[in-house]
Amino acid sequence: NDRLRVCPDGKTGSYDRIVPKFQKLVAGRGDKEYYVRGTFTKHNLDFTNDILEMERLGFDQISVEPVVSDPQLDYSIQEEDLPVVFKEY
């Protein structure tokens, strides 16, 4: 998260700031549906670990999707990454 979701200071990541806010939001919803959504990139092809971490944090309605981006970007998933992605499923 912190690699691509940087705070306005341009230095620190947003993960530690945002997770407690999401937890509070979900707790306040009671039985209402919600989804915590994650995006995996070339930098975290082992996204099963991300799902397990979200569950550990108390989230149980989770959606994780591959990044859709310009193939020239360093975090873009390339064809050669697909075997790793398929293993995660």
Image: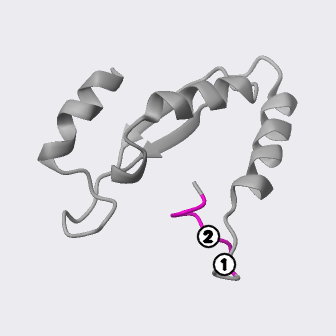
Q: For the residue marked with disc 1, what is the amino acid?
A: Lys
Q: Is residue 38 left or right of residue 17?
A: left
- Secondary-structure class at tag 1: loop
Is there CB contact under 8 Å for labels 2 and 1? Answer: yes
> Depth check: 89 or 68 in front?
89
Which quadrant holds residue 46?
A: top left
Badge 1 density bin: few <14, some 14–19, many ≥20, Cα 10 Å: few
Which quadrant holds residue 87?
A: top left
- Image quarter where the N terminus lies is bottom right
Q: Is residue 89 left or right of residue 50?
A: left
- Secondary-structure class at tag 2: loop
> Depth check: 71 or 25 in front?
71
Residue that carries the numbered disc 1 in the rendered image = 11
The structure residue drawn at horizontal position 69% and vertical position 54%, both measured from the top left corner, is: 15
Residue 32, horizontal then vertical, whole percent? 73, 22
Write down the region rendered in magenta: 2-8
Residue 16, horizontal then vertical, whole percent? 77, 54
Disc number for residue 6? 2
Q: Is residue 12 left or right of residue 89?
A: right
Q: Residue furthest left?
A: 79
